Every structure is written in C-alpha cells, then in structure tokens.
Amino acid sequence: MTQQIVGPTSHHFFSHRLKLHYVDWGNEGAPPLLMIHGGYDHCRNWDWMAEDLRRDYHIIAPDLRGHGDSAWGVGGSYMLADFVYDIAQLLRHTGLRPVRIVGHSFGGFLSLLFAGTFPEMVSHLVAIDPFIHSPEQLQAQRDKPVAPQLIGWMDRLHQLSARQPRRYPTLEDALQRMRGENPHLSVEQARHLTIHGVNQNEDGSYSWKFDNYMRGMQPQLLTGPECMELWARIACPVLFLRGGESKFSDPEHNGALAHFRDARAVNLPGAGHWVHHDKLAPVLELTRTFLRC
C-alpha cells in the first residue's frame, strides 16, 4: 500500500509580477534541495520522494508559472528564460543557495539551463528523463529559418485562443485520465496526483490546473550551440535517470552527455517517463547516493 503523505506547507513569492506558489517540507538548517516538476504537472508530484528525502534535506518545490497553484503568464506568453528567472527569484526569496536540484522532464531541462546560467548556485543535479535533444537535433533547430517558426507559433496561439479547458464530470473521470497517461500508477498514486492537479469548476466538473497556453510556447532562443554552451558551464555533477520505456531520447546514446563536464546516465527497466513514480525505491537509492557524493 502506498505510504500516507504528511504534507508540506504552502507559500508564495513574486516573480515578474506573478504570484507563484511553492511548498516547503521543513527541516530548516538541513542542506537545501529544490525539486522542479515537469510540464502540465504540479509540485505535489514529488510527494513520495520528498516524504523520504525530507529527513536529510530542506526541500522546497515550486509550481512553475502556468501550473498548479501559481499564476498563469500574462497574455499566455511563456519563454524558457522566464522560467529560469523564476527559479533564481525563488532562491533569492528563500535565501537557500547553493542548492541540490532534482528536476523531471521539462523541469529537468530547466534545471540544466539554470545550472549552466548560475553554476555557482548548484552543487548537485538529478535530471529525471528531461527532453534533451542530440547535438545534431539542436543544431538543426538553430538552422531553421526564423519566419516559419514565428508564423507557426502565431498559428498555434490562434488555435489555442478557441480551446477550452477540458472538463471532467467527476473526479473519478479525471483520475482515469491520469491513469491512462501512466499505466504504472497505482490507484492511490493517481488519486493523490489528481486531487492536487485539478480545480473544481462552478458547475461541479473538474479541469486540470495548468494553462493551455503552455502548449504554445514561443520559439526559443536557447537552441543548438546556446544549449550546449550552457551545458558545458555546469560545474556540478549531473545524474540523468531515464525509464527504459520512455519515448524521450537517451542523453548517453544521442551524444548530449559528452557536452557535460561531469555527467552519467542510468536507465531503469520497467519504468516510463515518470521514473520516480514507477520505480520509487531505486530512484530514491540512486538519488540519495548521488546527492551525498
């Protein structure tokens, strides 16, 4: 049976005039650990890892802008640099630095960008299945003409303007959608993630908390050589954890790992994209050992 979670406390800070939310698991005075969730997710997806790691670390976990209980971007505009700024602002707000970081998916990618921008602020970094392209793919992105990218982005925004958040008649319907996204989840896990991931609408239906405009992120400046330049600036050791069933590229096999000073990758069989949910015990063991080194 899944362990009962004793929850953290909720707090807010301001960044770019947005009111952003984060949770604090306590244990002040212990080494700080920042946990950054993935796209369309929320900070409470870390609860099972945080419940264990809180014994030895002071854990804070933000809801990224446009996610969870944080404000949505004004006008629906989202750029990578905004998210990196928010992370820096959270650490200024809390005074917790340097930090260890654990990031998943989009949060793992942001963690790498943050650690490359501010290498002195990060002592260890665990990137759980981040979407990290090969150097060749990044270069191909960089070489694309700008005009078609801008036109494509504007077309996506126009389509999103007519898109309404999906409504689920009951919490159980939303829970089934959650389980369909990750078949490895137990009913208890799916229920916990769903409860913290939805708002109840006035008519009694439920909708996910994230902003649909996240699907229309602007064309990014941080591609190709820029990404690889930031990766090379990361001064701390980096551990990549990936599920063997993940559809995301393996950084060791696609050549990305070679652009880091000190990085290694571990693949866990029988796990998908949410490795920390699918294989909690080995992920905790690997993470604990790595953070102590």
Image (tube, rainbow, N blue to C red):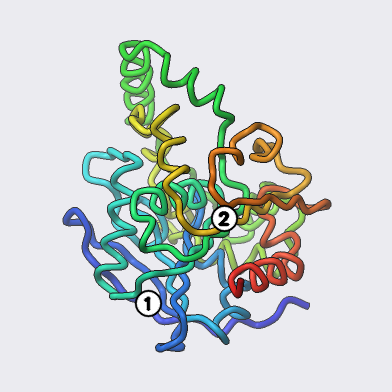
Residue marked by disc 1: 10
Height in image: 113 above or below 24? above
* Amino acid type, callout 1: Ser
In this view of the protein, which residue sits in the foreground, 147 or 163? Answer: 147
The residue located at (27%, 46%) in the rendering is 73
Quadrant location of the N terminus in the rendered image: bottom right
Give how far apart the Cα atoms at labels 1 and 2 are. Answer: 29 Å
Q: Residues within 10 Å of mark 1 (few under 14, many from 20)?
A: some
Q: Is residue 210 left or right of residue 94?
A: right
The percent coordinates of residue 259 (x first, y second) are 54, 39
- Return the mark for residue 238: 2
The residue located at (41%, 88%) in the rendering is 29
Which numbered disc, 1 or 2, marks the residue that appears first in the sequence?
A: 1
The percent coordinates of residue 177 (x first, y second) are 64, 49
* Amino acid type, callout 2: Val
Q: Quadrant of residue 32?
A: bottom left
For mark 2, give the secondary structure.
strand
Height in image: 292 above or below 79? below
For mark 1, give the secondary structure.
strand
Height in image: 142 above or below 39? above
- Return the mark for residue 39: none
The percent coordinates of residue 39 (x first, y second) are 49, 47
